[in-house]
Amino acid sequence: MCGIVGYIGREQAAPVLLEGLSRLEYRGYDSAGVAVFDAEAGTLAVHKAKGRLQVLSEQLHGGADLNSTMGVGHTRWATHGAPSDINSHPQVSHSGRIAVVHNGIIENYAELKAFLMAQGVPFTSETDTEVVAQLIEYFYEGDLLAAVGRVLRRIQGAYALGILCADCPDRIVAVRKDSPLILGYGEGCSLIASDVTAILGHTRRVGYMEDGELAVLTRESIQCYNHLMQPIEKKIVTVDWELDAAEKGGYEHFMFKEIMEQPDALRRCLSPRIREGDIMFEDLSLSQEFLQNMRRIYIVACGSSCHVGMVGKYHLERLTRIPVEVALGSEFRYMDPIVDRHTLVIVISQSGETLDTMAALREARRLGGRILSIVNVVGSSIARESNQVLYTWAGPEIAVATTKAYTTQLALLSLLALWMARRLGAVSGEEFQAALAAFQELPGKMEEVLSRRDSIQYLASRYFNHDSIFFIGRNLDYALGLEGSLKLKEISYIHSEAYAAGELKHGTISLIEDGTLVVALSTYGKLFSKAMSNVIEVKARGADVLSLTVESRGEEMRHTADGVMSIPDIHELLLPCLGVVPLQLFAYYVALMRGCDIDKPRNLAKSVTVE
Ligand code: F6R
């Protein structure tokens, strides 16, 4: 959601900015823009366009038209003001001296705008960001940093800012509060970006800005300041993500590439943690005393990450007998949660930047809970604010619809459940070893499922024309259905709902009529016969049933369902992790056949950094 790139160096800046923005496209946006310092004219040149980045890039001939070695760029996901050229960023002060790119929301912008307008400052856009540019100009008396400092004392909300001033051809100022911004330390250049993929082509040496920090970037160095404007040293870390991991590498879509990468992502996630017949969480320090006195577990997340939490609840409660509550990040703060020092709060987030999840984390910490996060993006805000972090090591996930991050989150949470159960003496050595062996078999079994993708493509070709689909399942299969349904609807735009199969009779079954597609999930062996009854029930009302089950039950299901997808039999802890793959593929092929924009579905953003 909104992407920022800034560059100051010796190369032409505009092509660097456009390339960086193209790597941030996946975050979701509806317009794009760049501002560069034009050394000949001594002014800022600003170019913006509504729509795809391609439009801007064509207008600027790939950036070759702009002769400048410093600038900032932005992809905007509209909040204040419709998507339009005028509302796009960079936003510029009325004299044209200050240009600002912004990710986040300035909550008190209306009051500040009224104040500035009363002073005669003319406004051109509807954005909250223009207020920041105008306010900097208002306070500017020749010292950019001082003016920015005065503005920061007045604005409220969440922001990452990149700021240019026509009087300062040797610097970019960056600020961060509650929205991600990283610093890139290149050879003869300095960069800012919303995430690391945007600058990997220039440097792997990055620094993570903390809330309230400012940075002044010059060609030679980056100086950081804390909120009191005192100079601080920033730790530089070297990122090990490869640039090609964030490229399509011959695949038509990132989503498909990421589906296919899942076995390797799982190996990266699990292998270092399963050794010598045990689970080694070297990155975890939950004492035996804490575990034994733990009274409750909350799992907090949004969207697909929350679906991981639903599966986790079943596993954790079954294995440890400790009560687990799953809460949406957006609801947690408002439900008066019962958290104390005996509560473990597991926060799940691919990006590590989801604002609602972050706010829930802070609330849980304030209440005294112990925060353990499961995160993909190293150094992200959620990772940094947690007591403990388990990284999924899935590599960069670019497609908006999550796949490999989901399966690695799920595998890791399931492994954590098993680890806790073992530490609490709730599973026998034999049960523990059997489960561990299943984790080791998981990537291979997933490869098998992926190798049979043609059969799923065929099923997609039979059903892609439906305009309403129901997913039903019980227990683990219900949680799996929630994710299967979300995957399908978000990329194919088909209306789809997931129901606990037993709940269907309490209302929704009235929607089932001749030809309605019901995807019936029955991988969980203990409830297979119940699942079968529900299949018969909906068939009796005319539904077309596509079933997902395990191979050992495939034959039985084939007698009743109209189509059957199957996965190899596996330990119940890993059923949803394996079972989601045919559902991801089904969603992918359906969306492909409907001609949808698979990697960037309408209205969606990869990293949701507003409430
Ligand atoms: C759906 C999807 C979203 C995310 C949600 C949380 O495919 O990707 O539902 O799961 O926006 O994002 P993270 O995990 O980054 O906190």
Image (tube, rainbow, N blue to C red):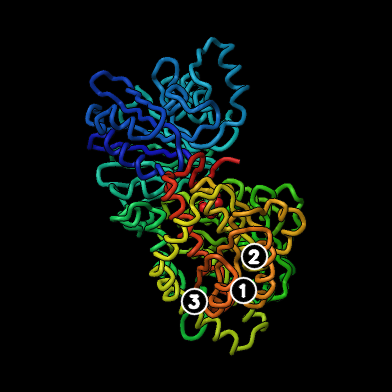
Question: Farthest bottom residue?
Answer: 430
Say whether disc 1 or disc 2 marks the residue closer to the N-terminus: 2
- Whether tag 1 and tag 2 are in contact, CB under 8 A, the answer is yes
Q: Is residue 415 something that shows in the picture?
A: no
Residue 21 image position (x, y, % from top left): 36, 39
Question: Looking at the image, which residue is at 30% across and 26% down?
Answer: 37
Instruction: Kindly identify which numbered label has been placed on residue 568.
Output: 3
Residue designated by label 2: 473
Amino acid type, mark 2: Gly
Between 384 and 277, the residue placed more toward the observer is 277
Residue designated by label 1: 524
Q: Please tell me whether residue 148 is drawn above or below residue 498 in the rendered image.
A: above
Between 577 and 393, the residue placed more toward the observer is 577
Amino acid type, mark 1: Tyr
Residue 314 image position (x, y, % from top left): 66, 69
Q: Residues within 10 Å of mark 3 (few under 14, many from 20)?
A: some
For mark 3, give the secondary structure.
loop
Residue 261 image position (x, y, % from top left): 39, 63
> How far apart in space, not on screen, are marks 3 and 2 (Cα)?
18 Å
54 sits left or right of 442 in the view: left
Q: Is residue 468 something that shows in the picture?
A: yes
